Amino acid sequence: MRRVSFYRRGLIWYASFFNTATKRYTGARSTGETDKEAAHLQVARWERDGFPDSGGRRRTLSETCDIDTIVQLIRQVPLVTRDAERIVSALKARELIEYAVLRDGPGAEEFIPFLLRFWDYEQSAYVREKLAHRQRIGRGHCYDMTLRVRTHWAAYFKARRLAEIRKANVRDFCIWLDKERNLQSRTINNVLAAGSVPLRWAFENDYVPINPAHGVLKFGGKSQRRGVLTEDEVRRLFSSPWPHKRAYVGNMLSMCTGLRSGEILAIQARDIEEDRLRVRHSWHFKGTSFSLRSIASHCRLLTYSVMGPAIVMKRARPRLLSPFISLLYAFSSS
């Protein structure tokens, strides 16, 4: 018979068994008895029949002490990452766990920095892989996805780690986009893609053992059509202070002429004439086409001066290099 230590918590007697391998007592078990002699009888039955197990079987006292020995060794013996991998592998082989996250493994990376690095056109392993297989992926697409990560995913997931993301988290995130951010169905699906594509890639490349975005339903239904600003709304919009002069000038020009953003970005000094604007160029991440034409503007160009080059690529996003020293418009009667 093993050495047994009895003590009482409140009215109930507990028993601990001496483990000869670790030279320590095991964790205390409740006998469920208020009388000490009855507690002794319960311990005798355990030693004879074993302890009841959650799986429906009974575990012998010897097996219980073996498990206690394993736990104590894991706590006390110096271990490295390779040792932890072997322990996890053994538990997986026994189908006792589905996956585990190693502290210095790829899944331990913070989730939002992982997403931002994934959509960084210059650094992304995903982008390099796509291009190496002669598949198309544009800088504009990566830039749009980066904005969605910063605006929505970062606001919701904050400092979570990659391997901590579960399917329930992604589902809750979609509901949050709908209820809290009040986004349209198409926008929600676009935002979801900014995270679901990296999560699928992480799963396929063994960063995480499961893909938490797999099976998450997309939003259906028609998105609300964009409206058209009224004349009063336009006047109030352009009479309000704009923090960026270039944005004001570009939007004013677009409103007056109907030019696309890429055509505005590509305007050169020779394109601006006294009574019209020549559309000879266009610029976009994807090299969008344009139609060669001239536009007689409803806005009178009072003064202008253009510096070049107008556009440069830097960090996968367009930036105007002071293309207009002074570009002033005044409304004239149509």
Image (spheres, rainbow, N blue to C red):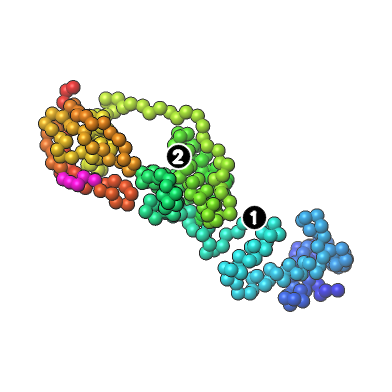
User: Residue at 47% of width from left, 42% of height from top?
Assistant: 193
How busy is the neighbourhood of tag 2: few (under 14 within 10 Å), some, or many (20 plus)?
some
Q: Which residues fall within the magenta stretch?
A: 307-311
Disc 1 marks a residue whose amino acid type is: Glu
Which of disc 1 and disc 2 is earlier in sequence?
1
User: Residue at 64% of width from left, 62% of height from top?
Assistant: 89
Judged from this view, the residue extending furthest toward the front is 134
Say the numbered circle drawn on residue 98.
Answer: 1
Q: Is residue 163 left or right of residue 238?
A: right
Q: Is residue 61 left or right of residue 279?
A: right
Residue 231, image x and y in percent? Answer: 27, 25
| Magenta stretch prevailing secondary structure | loop
In magenta segment, residue 308: yes
Name the one closer to the observer, 255 or 20: 255
User: Residue at 85% of width from left, 67% of height from top?
Assistant: 47
How busy is the neighbourhood of tag 1: few (under 14 within 10 Å), some, or many (20 plus)?
few
Q: Is residue 34 visible?
A: no
Say the numbered circle drawn on residue 190.
Answer: 2
Disc 2 marks a residue whose amino acid type is: Asn
Q: Is residue 100 left or right of residue 39?
A: left
Residue 237, image x and y in percent? Answer: 27, 33
User: Residue at 24% of width from left, 40% of height from top?
Assistant: 265
Location of residue 83 by image quarter: bottom right
